[in-house]
Amino acid sequence: MTAYLETTVDKFIFRVATDRNYCSEGLWTKAEGNLVRIGLTDFWQQRNGDVAFAEIEPVGTTLTVGDVISTIETIKVDIELTSPVNGNIVEINPEMEDNPELINQDPYGDGWLAVIEVADWAAEQAKLLDSQAYFMLMKGQAEKEARER
Amino acid sequence: MNATKVVIIPCSGIGKTYGTVSREAAYEVIEDLRPGETQLVALSMLVLGDEQACKVVTENPSVTVDGCKLACATKMVAESGGVVAADFAVLDVYRRNRQFKPKGIAELNEGGQKLAHALAEEILAVVDDLTARDSSSEDDSATKKPEAGK
């Protein structure tokens, strides 16, 4: 069972799953061998609002870090998400076409976006944040935004 | 003449595009499409517990139009003792009409206006269904009355 780090900022509760890595933009990565599942964090989905559409690059797409992997349209913003790892997309979440709200409902579970096959997970992981580091980063961002509201 | 009116309660989210879409759709139905059969109740009046507003929603079927997943309109009608005959979410309607991308707050862009119109058409279908049922039950009771008097 996944454990979470949790913080309350203003009236919002944000959770960070401890069993994965993160990039500062708010994507999580979870390795299963050399297959890396990616998705969006709880903070990302709460900050950007209800997802209207989620388009993901097709299976077979080769990505380097920084390439666009997905375009998400929410009730607040349109955002291009860039890949946190180098590799090839081997699977995309089929639910995203008809049920993109899964990103809001279950960001660390059924709301995953894609699976990327990487050549060297250890090298990729070294460039990512661990859950504690992301938690502190996220908490700082959330508190800053709360002060500015 | 129908005994009841369909009450429409849109989102009250001020400063939110989807809230504006919900209100524009409600206004279109109430002011232009079915002025005689529908009535607007401001969500804020239910939140305040206004007696007249609560009375209206408890005595008439309600159609709620929510601007986000918090679904305040639907929840407040239920909390006020009303019956939600149908609930709409602007996001769901947008997913069915992606070509109408809404933008703007005080004033919607063209996509937002078209989305509001599409939503109004969906609300209209429900309103017509509810009013037809109401007329039908009135007709039934009218034809039954003489029988009851026999």
Image (cartoon, grey):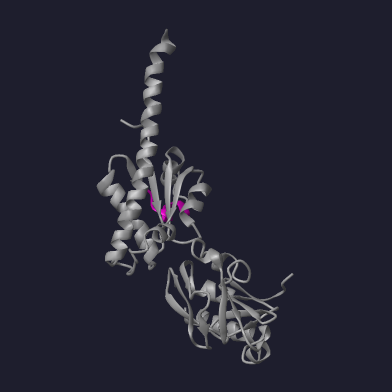
Horizontal side, residue A125 vs residue B62: left or right: right
Looking at the image, can residue A40 be seen? Answer: no
Residue A8 vs residue A45, the one in the foreground: A45
Residue extending farthest to the left is: B32
Image point 62% across, 92% down: which residue? A127
Residue A73 in which image quadrant: bottom left
Q: Is residue B142 above or below residue A87?
A: above
Q: Which percent across, then down, holds residue A148?
A: 47, 82
Query: How many badges with numbers are in the image?
Result: 0
In the figure, B117 relative to A109: above or below?
above
Q: Residue at x 68, y 90 (%)?
A: A122
**Relative to residue A48, is residue A139 depicted above or below?**
below
Magenta span contains residue A113: no
Q: What is the residue that sits farthest to the front in this orientation?
A: A60
Highlighted magenta segment, given as a residue range:
B40-47
> Magenta: predominant secondary structure element?
helix
x, y percentage for residue A75? 43, 68
Q: Is residue B42 magenta?
A: yes
Q: Is residue B97 visible?
A: yes
User: Of all residues shown, which one is farthest toward the top?
Assistant: B150
* Most foreground residue, B98 or B90: B98
Q: Could you tell me residue B1's position as x and y percent? A: 30, 30
